[in-house]
Amino acid sequence: MSATAPVNRILRSSIVDGPGNRAVVFLQGCNFNCVYCHNPETIALCRACGECVAACPAGALSRDGGGIQWRQERCVRCDACLKLCPHTSSPRVRRLSPEEVMAEIEPSIPFIRGITVSGGECTLYPEFLRRLGELARERPLSFFLDSNGSYAFSEDPALLAQTDKVMLDVKADPDDPQEYRRVTGNDGARLSARLDFLAGAGKLWEIRTVVSPGLFDAAAVVDKLCRRIAGADPPVQYKLIRYRPIGVRPEAAAALLQPGEDMMNALERICAGHGVKAVVV
């Protein structure tokens, strides 16, 4: 039996998580706690506190021994459980094997180019990823990972071999551990070296930065990162993501600002100035 992982949800079609139309698997659990997280319900594993049970209008949740049982067939996806969870978690998580995940994706295979695994932080479950990558190659489908850069791919050649490309989230200045911890709750140690390794191995598809005015010096961060990827072969894409107060925790919605067109255009010009041609805003 393959190693299992906690699966938050599976999208059988997405055009924003890598090239072409792709299936996306979101795993539960993250070693970061970003202030602007747009999927905060994926950060922690369920503690079975039970507060969500009575709040579910569809009766899809119940206590089951020491845990919470979710009846998927009853769920109406109203998100009441997510909105009141005090632990940035979700009771709607299934522990699945790579084979079970692939079985759910199988009907979409004629219409997709590949699979992207996201989170949470997907690299918390490397054994699961290695096997899912094998299954993807057998189809054949490209296999992408969306990661926060905390995993040492250089020390896991088996996972690197199964992974076609990595999309790397760079959330602040990777060389300023205090700033990184303020933004993410993690110091981002060795992120620059891991970015360089993936680019040198031809495994880095894109880097991603969420932009919110005043959170950090976005212009300085984009400039620094563009210098690192400007000569990469094959080229690395840079995705500049506007912070939006959608799906975030209330304290983030109240404290963070959305960037204007002028700011995003200026960041795009920085990329162009370094010869980074593949820029997505």
Image: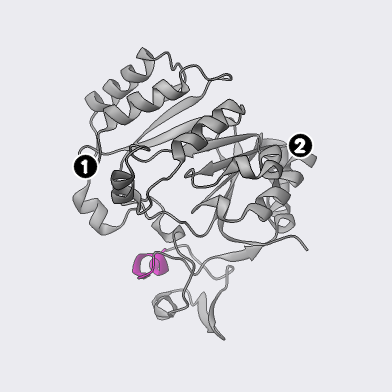
* Nearer-the-camera pick, 35 or 230: 230
Residue 197 falls within the magenta-colored stretch: no
Residue 281, percent from left and from top: 38, 28
Q: Which mark is residue 257?
A: 1
Query: Which residue appears at 41% of the width and 45% of the height?
Result: 188
* Residue 241 visible in rendering: yes
Looking at the rendering, which quadrant does residue 277 occupy? top left
Query: Which residue appears at 31% of the width and 52% of the height?
Result: 35
Query: Mark 1 belongs to which amino acid?
Result: Leu
Residue 154, percent from left and from top: 61, 40
Query: Mark 2 belongs to which amino acid?
Result: Pro
Q: Which residue is mark 2?
A: 140
Q: Secondary structure at mark 1?
A: loop
Q: Residue furthest bottom?
A: 65
What span is colored magenta in the figure? 79-87
Q: CA distance from mark 2 to mark 1?
A: 42 Å
Left or right of 198 in this view: 225: left
Where's the N terminus, which quadrant? bottom right
Query: Which residue appears at 47% of the width and 74% of the height?
Result: 58
Q: Are marks 2 and 1 in contact (CB under 8 Å)?
A: no
> Going from the N terminus, do you reach mark 2 or mark 1 first?
2
In this view, 90 is above or below 146? below
Q: Residues within 10 Å of mark 1 (few under 14, many from 20)?
A: some
